[in-house]
Amino acid sequence: EHEAEDVLMLATLIGIGAEEHEFLWIAKEAYQADLPPGWDIYFDEEGKHFYYNTDSNISTYEHPSIEFYRKLYQDFKVKDEEFRKRQEERELAIGRQDDDEEEDASAPQTGDTGAAARGGR
């Protein structure tokens, strides 16, 4: 289906890596997005589509909203990396806590119990 190919092409233009499946929703949203007001789509002599802004007389081969989706991807990627880093730190902290509890459980008990076992007071 052409839609899937177009979404993957958009993903590449946005900067989404081939292995970054969790961000493909951004490319799909870009694919389905309406053109901003004032923009129309046209075709050049070779049949390739381009975008033209009737208010500013600017034309471009890139979707006029592509920068918005590039920034959206970058923002989500940073947030995702921050979340993963915090998650790893939590897992390490939990692992250290578990190690401490295991050490406490295997450590010999100290206190008055030794004196009582020997018949002392």
Image (cartoon, grey):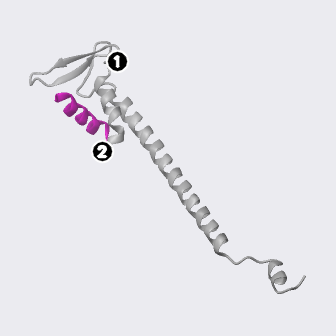
Residue 87 is marked as: none
All told, the count of numbered labels is 2
Which of the image's four quarters has the N terminus?
A: top left
Closer to the camera in the image, 101 or 51: 101
Residue 60 relative to residue 47: left or right:
right
Residue farthest to the bottom, as pictured: 118
Residue 36 is marked as: 1
Q: Which residue is located at x 43 percent, y 39 percent? A: 76
Task: State the extent of the magenta-drawn residues as a range.
Answer: 1-18
Residue 41, above or below 86: above
**Image coordinates for residue 86, horizontal then vertical, percent:** 53, 51
Residue farthest to the left, as pictured: 46
**Image coordinates for residue 80, horizontal then vertical, percent:** 45, 44
In which quadrant of the rendered view does residue 64 lie?
Answer: top left
Disc 2 marks which amino acid? Gly
Asked whether residue 9 is drawn in magenta, I would say: yes
Residue farthest to the right, as pictured: 121
Q: Which residue is located at x 33 percent, y 27 percent? A: 29
Closer to the camera in the image, 9 or 22: 22
Local crowd at mark 1 within 10 Å, few (<14), some, or many (≥20)?
few
Residue at image mark 2: 17
**Image coordinates for residue 71, horizontal then vertical, percent:** 40, 35
Disc 1 marks which amino acid? Pro
In this rendering, the label closer to the viewer, 2 or 1: 2
**Of helix, strand and loop, which one carries label 2?**
loop
